[in-house]
Image (tube, rainbow, N blue to C red):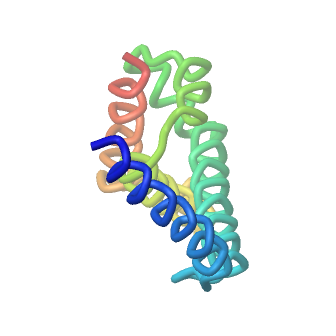
Protein backbone atom coordinates (compact mmCIF):
# COMPACT_ATOMS: atom_id res chain seq x y z
CA UNK A 1 0.00 0.00 0.00
CA UNK A 2 2.76 2.57 0.81
CA UNK A 3 4.45 1.99 -2.54
CA UNK A 4 1.20 2.52 -4.42
CA UNK A 5 0.68 5.75 -2.51
CA UNK A 6 4.19 6.95 -3.37
CA UNK A 7 3.64 6.07 -7.00
CA UNK A 8 0.39 8.06 -7.12
CA UNK A 9 1.44 11.06 -5.04
CA UNK A 10 4.57 12.00 -6.99
CA UNK A 11 2.88 12.29 -10.42
CA UNK A 12 -0.10 14.06 -8.88
CA UNK A 13 2.12 16.71 -7.28
CA UNK A 14 4.01 17.17 -10.54
CA UNK A 15 0.77 17.51 -12.48
CA UNK A 16 -0.61 20.14 -10.07
CA UNK A 17 2.59 22.19 -10.22
CA UNK A 18 2.52 22.28 -14.01
CA UNK A 19 -1.13 23.25 -14.45
CA UNK A 20 -1.45 26.03 -11.85
CA UNK A 21 0.46 28.77 -13.73
CA UNK A 22 -1.44 28.02 -16.93
CA UNK A 23 -4.75 29.06 -15.37
CA UNK A 24 -3.38 32.05 -13.47
CA UNK A 25 -3.27 34.24 -16.58
CA UNK A 26 -6.87 33.65 -17.62
CA UNK A 27 -8.85 36.69 -18.73
CA UNK A 28 -11.53 37.79 -16.28
CA UNK A 29 -15.19 37.71 -17.29
CA UNK A 30 -15.46 41.45 -16.56
CA UNK A 31 -12.68 43.87 -17.33
CA UNK A 32 -11.37 45.42 -14.07
CA UNK A 33 -11.71 48.94 -15.51
CA UNK A 34 -15.38 48.29 -16.35
CA UNK A 35 -15.94 46.98 -12.85
CA UNK A 36 -14.29 50.05 -11.33
CA UNK A 37 -16.37 52.33 -13.55
CA UNK A 38 -19.59 50.59 -12.48
CA UNK A 39 -18.67 50.96 -8.80
CA UNK A 40 -17.78 54.64 -9.31
CA UNK A 41 -21.09 55.25 -11.09
CA UNK A 42 -23.03 53.57 -8.26
CA UNK A 43 -21.23 55.62 -5.61
CA UNK A 44 -21.83 58.83 -7.58
CA UNK A 45 -25.56 58.06 -7.83
CA UNK A 46 -25.78 57.42 -4.09
CA UNK A 47 -23.93 60.69 -3.40
CA UNK A 48 -26.35 62.57 -5.68
CA UNK A 49 -29.33 60.93 -3.94
CA UNK A 50 -28.02 61.93 -0.52
CA UNK A 51 -27.39 65.49 -1.74
CA UNK A 52 -31.00 65.73 -2.97
CA UNK A 53 -32.24 64.54 0.43
CA UNK A 54 -30.06 67.02 2.31
CA UNK A 55 -31.26 69.83 0.02
CA UNK A 56 -34.91 68.95 0.64
CA UNK A 57 -34.40 68.72 4.40
CA UNK A 58 -32.66 72.11 4.42
CA UNK A 59 -35.64 73.88 2.83
CA UNK A 60 -37.53 76.21 5.18
CA UNK A 61 -40.86 74.78 4.03
CA UNK A 62 -39.79 71.25 4.98
CA UNK A 63 -38.41 72.48 8.29
CA UNK A 64 -41.74 74.18 9.03
CA UNK A 65 -43.71 71.01 8.30
CA UNK A 66 -41.26 68.93 10.34
CA UNK A 67 -41.54 71.30 13.30
CA UNK A 68 -45.34 71.17 13.15
CA UNK A 69 -45.40 67.38 13.34
CA UNK A 70 -42.56 67.17 15.86
CA UNK A 71 -39.79 65.62 13.75
CA UNK A 72 -36.18 66.24 14.75
CA UNK A 73 -34.49 67.22 11.48
CA UNK A 74 -31.03 66.85 13.00
CA UNK A 75 -31.62 63.13 13.45
CA UNK A 76 -33.30 62.88 10.06
CA UNK A 77 -30.37 64.57 8.34
CA UNK A 78 -27.93 62.27 10.14
CA UNK A 79 -29.98 59.26 9.01
CA UNK A 80 -29.52 60.25 5.37
CA UNK A 81 -25.89 59.05 5.53
CA UNK A 82 -26.97 55.57 6.63
CA UNK A 83 -29.56 55.06 3.91
CA UNK A 84 -28.81 52.76 0.98
CA UNK A 85 -30.45 50.73 -1.74
CA UNK A 86 -34.12 51.02 -2.61
CA UNK A 87 -34.91 53.14 0.47
CA UNK A 88 -32.36 55.75 -0.59
CA UNK A 89 -33.65 55.76 -4.17
CA UNK A 90 -37.31 56.19 -3.14
CA UNK A 91 -36.53 58.92 -0.63
CA UNK A 92 -34.29 60.73 -3.12
CA UNK A 93 -36.99 60.61 -5.80
CA UNK A 94 -39.47 62.14 -3.37
CA UNK A 95 -36.90 64.75 -2.33
CA UNK A 96 -36.23 65.68 -5.95
CA UNK A 97 -39.96 66.18 -6.52
CA UNK A 98 -40.11 68.43 -3.47
CA UNK A 99 -37.04 70.37 -4.61
CA UNK A 100 -38.41 70.71 -8.13
CA UNK A 101 -41.77 72.01 -6.89
CA UNK A 102 -40.13 74.66 -4.73
CA UNK A 103 -37.69 75.71 -7.44
CA UNK A 104 -40.63 76.07 -9.81
CA UNK A 105 -42.16 78.69 -7.53
CA UNK A 106 -44.45 76.54 -5.41
CA UNK A 107 -43.05 78.16 -2.28
CA UNK A 108 -44.56 81.52 -3.21
CA UNK A 109 -48.00 80.02 -3.74
CA UNK A 110 -49.99 77.73 -1.49
CA UNK A 111 -48.15 74.43 -1.12
CA UNK A 112 -50.10 71.72 -2.91
CA UNK A 113 -51.32 68.66 -1.06
CA UNK A 114 -49.05 66.54 -3.25
CA UNK A 115 -46.02 68.43 -2.01
CA UNK A 116 -47.12 68.07 1.60
CA UNK A 117 -47.68 64.34 1.13
CA UNK A 118 -44.23 63.97 -0.43
CA UNK A 119 -42.61 65.87 2.42
CA UNK A 120 -44.45 63.78 5.00
CA UNK A 121 -43.53 60.57 3.17
CA UNK A 122 -39.91 61.65 3.16
CA UNK A 123 -39.94 62.46 6.86
CA UNK A 124 -41.71 59.22 7.79
CA UNK A 125 -39.25 57.20 5.72
CA UNK A 126 -36.30 58.83 7.43
CA UNK A 127 -37.85 58.33 10.89
CA UNK A 128 -38.32 54.63 10.16
CA UNK A 129 -34.69 54.34 9.12
CA UNK A 130 -33.48 56.14 12.23
CA UNK A 131 -35.33 53.75 14.52
Q: At x 61% / y 19%, what residue is drawn?
A: 74
Q: Pick whichever, 107 or 127, lies toward us.
A: 127
- Residue 99: name its quadrant: bottom right
* Residue ID at (64%, 58%): 43
Depicted 35 relative to depicted 53: above or below = below
Q: Quadrant of the C terminus?
A: top left
Image coordinates for residue 41, horizontal then vertical, percent: 64, 70
Q: Quadrant of residue 78?
A: top right
The residue sitting at 43% across, 50% down in the picture is: 6
Decide if residue 84 is on the left or right side of residue 75: left
In this view of the protein, can residue 110 be seen by the observer? no
Q: So how many labels did they put on this image?
A: 0
Query: Left of 87 or right of it: where is 97?
Result: right
**Is residue 13 or residue 42 the one in the foreground?**
13
Q: From what the image shows, is residue 114 above or below residue 79?
A: below
- Could you tell whether 70 is left or right of 58 in the image? left
Quadrant of the frame with the N terminus: top left
Residue drawn at the location 64% of the way across and 73% of the way down: 24
Task: State the image coordinates of residue 37 (x, y, percent, origin top left).
Answer: 69, 75
Residue 97 percent coordinates (x, y): 46, 62
**Where residue 112 sits: x, y (%)?**
36, 55
Could you say which is closer to the camera, residue 105 or residue 116? 116
Q: Is residue 129 above or below residue 7?
A: above
Q: Is residue 98 visible?
A: yes
Amino acid sequence: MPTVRKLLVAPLILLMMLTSPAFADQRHAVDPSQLAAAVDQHVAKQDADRAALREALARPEVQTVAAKIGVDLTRATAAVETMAGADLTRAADAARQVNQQFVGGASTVVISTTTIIIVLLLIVLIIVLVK
